[in-house]
Image: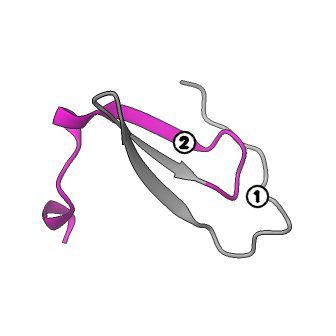
Amino acid sequence: MVPNTAPASKSCVDHEVMMAEDSGDVIIADICRDGAWLSMPVGDALALADWQ
C-alpha cells in the first residue's frame, strides 16, 4: 500500500477516525482524507484494552 500524502480536506478541522469489520478484516479510516485507510486481518488487530 502506498501512503497517501494528500492534504486534509479544508472542510474538516478535526480528524475523525472510524473502524469497521468486514469479511474478517478490520478497516480503519480517517474520514477527513480521501484514501487514508488501512486494512488488516482481525487476528492481527490488537484489542482496544491492549492499547490502554
**Residue at 23% across / 36% down in the picture?**
42
Find the magenta span and give its range.
31-52
> What colour-coding does the image apply?
one colour
Q: Position of residue 44 (x, y in %)?
A: 20, 35
Q: Dot 1: few (<14), some (14–19), or many (≥20) neighbours within 10 Å?
A: some
Farthest residue, direction front: 23
Place residue 8 in its image quadrant: bottom right
Residue furthest out toward the top: 1
**50 or 26: which is nearer to us?**
26
Indicate which disc, 2 or 1, sits on the residue closer to the N terminus: 1
Q: CA distance from mark 2 to mark 1?
A: 13 Å
- As for residue 42 lying within the magenta part, the answer is yes
Where does label 1 land, which residue? 8
Tell me, yes or no, whether the highlighted magenta stretch contains residue 11: no
List the single residue furthest toward the right: 10
- The kind of residue on which mark 2 rests is Trp
Q: Which mark is residue 25?
A: none
Q: Which residue is mark 2?
A: 37
How many other residues sit within 10 Å of disc 2, few (<14), some (14-19) or many (≥20)? some
Exactly how many numbered labels are in the figure? 2
Residue at x 53%, y 49% (from the top left corner): 29
Q: 18 or 7: nearer the eye?
A: 18
Q: Quadrant of the C terminus?
A: bottom left
16 relative to 21 in the view: left or right: right
Rendered location of residue 21, percent (x, y): 35, 41
- Quarter occupied by residue 3: top right
The front one of 19 and 51 is 19
Q: Which amino acid type is shown beneath numbered disc 1?
A: Ala
Q: Residue at x 16, y 34 (%)?
A: 43
